[in-house]
Amino acid sequence: MTAASTPKTVTQPESFTFTKANLKTAKAIIARYPEGRQASAVLALLDLAQRQHDNWLPRAAMDAVAEMLDMPPIRVYEVATFYTMFNLAPVGRNFLQVCTTTPCWLCGSNEVLRACKDVLDIGPGESTADGSFSVVEVECLGACVNAPMLQLNDDYYEDLDYARTKALLEALKRGEAPDPGPQVARQASAPVTGPTTISETKV
Ligand code: FES
């Protein structure tokens, strides 16, 4: 089992430059907004920068975005520090965001966190020493119907309990890629017991 690590200091790169492909994408995003309203592209550009930089945003990337959008850097820092979708320090390759807001908590998010602790030996705000997993607690991710749930990188895993979370994490540790979505036999967020309305259709 790998020991947990929580970096206290972050080594910041000296500079950040968009790749040629991402620069083209960034310019296309900026062009969607009227002249003088380029700042509206800040979220999209920060996301692009984070994806390019191993899922975290160094200060140099925020400064590069500020310069591209002609914004004071502090305004970009304000955005990046407000939204939990932006990571200001390195995170594991498997970045687990566990929702613990009321609906998920009532449906057992504590058991999801307990499975993370048991399988990965890390709690919220920690990463495994080998850099393969990080766990954070987040507020509602908008999938309350399928609570409790967690987000793994870009995918949602829903209808979790202790055993399903444990199975998911163990599969990830083996290098497998389990199907995202509900982890029980339901379609998307349809009732888990099957349709309760419009159960018959006529052609
Ligand atoms: S409360 Fe967890 S997704 Fe909404």
Image (tube, rainbow, N blue to C red):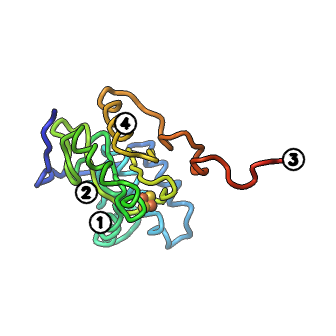
Q: Note whether ligand 1 is within 8 Å of mark 4.
A: no
Type of residue at label 3? Lys
Type of residue at label 4? Leu
Q: Note whether ligand 1 is within 8 Å of mark 3.
A: no
Q: Closer to the observer: label 2 or label 4?
A: 4
Contact between marks 4 and 3 (CB within 8 A): the answer is no
Within 10 Å of disc 1 (Cα), the crowding (few <14, some 14-19, many 20+) is few
Type of residue at label 1? Thr
The residue wearing badge 3 is 202
Find residue 39 and report its image quarter.
bottom left
Q: What residue sits 38% from the left and 68% below the top?
A: 70
Secondary structure under the numbered disc 3 in the rendered image: loop
Within 10 Å of disc 3 (Cα), the crowding (few <14, some 14-19, many 20+) is few
The numbered mark, 2 or 3, whose residue comes first in the sequence reads 2
Q: Quadrant of the N terminus?
A: top left
Q: Closer to the observer: label 4 or label 3?
A: 3
Q: Quadrant of the C terminus?
A: top right
Tell me the CA gap for discs 4 and 1.
30 Å
The numbered mark, 4 or 3, whose residue comes first in the sequence reads 4
The numbered mark, 4 or 1, whose residue comes first in the sequence reads 1
The residue wearing badge 2 is 88
Contact between marks 2 and 1 (CB within 8 A): the answer is yes
- Residue 170 seen anywhere in this rendered image of the structure: yes
The residue wearing badge 4 is 168
Type of residue at label 2? Leu
Image region (quadrant) for ligand 1: bottom left
